[in-house]
Image (tube, rainbow, N blue to C red):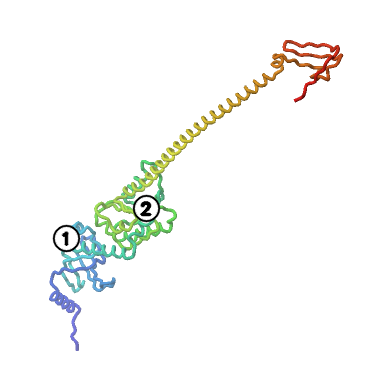
């Protein structure tokens, strides 16, 4: 019959086997699966190992960081690594392997190497960038045409964020008096839920894309560890493929994240984003004023040229009319002279006389004996009765 033993005996044998096979302290690489900051001050977490090439779990163990250690280890790690100690990060931890007959295997975490996590995060970041480049996503959003006057703004931010309030204040208080319409789409802006929350907000905006000119992703300043979520692939690909130009103002000064790389325009802070939008209006206003000045100058020049042309034309017309009037006056003077020369008074003054019989100009045949003849001379008129006509000489007509 096979050997029988109690559960305690089995657990004790497993414990001794582990103690014999594994050093009391060992450095282990793993990903944090779940992490629970217990009210007691202890930190309980799951350490997971995945099969290379996919997300299949090949190993999993419970870990604990006792309160006295956690109070020192957490701020040290986060300050050095620049990221929060949270679910999803890869860590190199110094563990003490323990096995309890009641609670089973547990890894007592004594130390964490921040440099390993930084390297893993950067490696993951570079892999995400390479993937986006391979998929042609890096420049997709930047190729969209930014409206000349981006007035209708969809904002992805937290409704309680100081950065959002700063953005609205800067936008609405602009010196140019330009008016904007702003609609907030609330999202978590840090932590492991942030990428999915931002993507959900973008999806809401995309359903109403005709109502907006641009989408803006903003948050206030914060520690570098709060911004790791903006290196997330899903967030980045949604920004890259978004149907509207996306402007980011995540609030960091020294470097920029993948979300910034794939956005249409990257700016440091929410107020910088507001200034950028205001400047777009100011630039257009300046362009229009410059155009107005050019048009005014062109019209003024054109009016001046046409006025000069009209002045010259007026002078020419005046001269032409004056010359025409003078010519016609000369003609009238000549006509007057000719008329004066042909007037009866002038003719009579030269010794001629006008002879009429019966009120009509007389001819030779009208003058007969007994005719009443009227003779008009220069100094008067004589009437007489013809007594006898002695000799009639008829002149030849021309």
Please tell me whether residue 310 is drawn above or below residue 204 in the rendered image.
above
**Residue that mark 2 sits on:** 155
- Residue 157: x and y in percent read 34, 54
**Residue that mark 1 sits on:** 68
Which numbered circle lies on residue 213?
none
Q: Is 142 in front, or is 121?
A: 142
Identify the element where label 1 is drawn: helix
Residue found 30% across the figure and 65% down from its top: 131
Q: Is 292 in front, or is 154?
A: 292
Is residue 157 in sight in this rendering? no
Residue furthest to the bottom in view is 1
Quadrant in which residue 24 is drawn: bottom left
Residue found 44% across the figure and 53% down from its top: 211
Identify the element where label 2 is drawn: strand
Position of residue 25 in the picture relative to residue 369 (left or right): left
Q: Residues within 10 Å of mark 1 (few under 14, many from 20)?
A: few
Disc on the earlier residue, 1 or 2: 1
């Amino acid at each position: 019959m096979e050997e029988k033993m109690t559960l305690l005996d089995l657990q004790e044998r497993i414990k001794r086997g582990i103690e014999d096979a594994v050093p009391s302290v060992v450095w282990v690489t793993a990903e944090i699966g779940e992490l629970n900051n217990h009210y007691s001050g202890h930190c309980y977490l799951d350490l997971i190992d995945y099969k290379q090439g996919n997300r299949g779990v090949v190993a999993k163990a419970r870990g604990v960081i006792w309160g006295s250690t956690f109070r020192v280890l957490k701020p040290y790690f986060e300050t050095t690594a620049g990221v929060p100690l949270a679910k999803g990060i890869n860590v190199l931890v110094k563990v003490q392997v323990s096995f309890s007959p009641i609670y089973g295997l547990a890894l007592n975490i004594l130390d964490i190497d921040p440099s390993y996590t930084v390297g893993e995060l950067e490696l993951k970041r570079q892999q995400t960038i390479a993937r986006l480049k391979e998929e042609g996503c890096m420049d997709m959003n930047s190729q969209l045409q930014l409206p000349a006057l981006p007035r209708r703004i969809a904002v992805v931010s937290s409704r309680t964020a100081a950065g959002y309030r700063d953005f609205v204040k800067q936008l609405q208080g602009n010196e140019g008096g330009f008016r904007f319409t702003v609609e907030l789409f609330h999202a978590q802006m840090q932590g492991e839920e942030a990428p999915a929350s931002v993507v959900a907000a973008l999806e809401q905006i995309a359903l109403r894309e005709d109502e907006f000119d641009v989408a803006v992703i903003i948050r206030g300043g914060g520690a570098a560890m709060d911004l790791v979520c903006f290196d997330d692939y899903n967030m980045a690909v949604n920004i890259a493929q978004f149907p509207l130009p996306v402007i980011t103002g995540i609030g960091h000064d020294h470097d920029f994240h993948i979300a910034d790389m794939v956005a249409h325009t990257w700016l440091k802070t929410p107020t910088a984003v507001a200034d950028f939008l205001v400047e777009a209006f100011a630039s257009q206003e300046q362009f229009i004023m410059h155009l107005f000045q050019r048009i005014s100058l062109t019209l003024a020049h054109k009016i001046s040229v046409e006025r000069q042309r009209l002045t010259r034309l007026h002078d020419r017309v005046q001269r032409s009319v004056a010359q025409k009037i003078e010519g016609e006056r000369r003609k009238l003077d000549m006509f007057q002279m000719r008329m004066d020369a042909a007037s009866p008074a002038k003719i009579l003054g030269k010794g001629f006389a006008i002879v009429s019989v019966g009120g009509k100009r007389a001819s030779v045949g009208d003058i007969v004996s007994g005719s009443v003849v009227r003779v008009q001379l220069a100094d008067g008129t004589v009437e007489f009765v013809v007594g006898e006509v002695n000799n009639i000489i008829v002149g030849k007509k021309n």
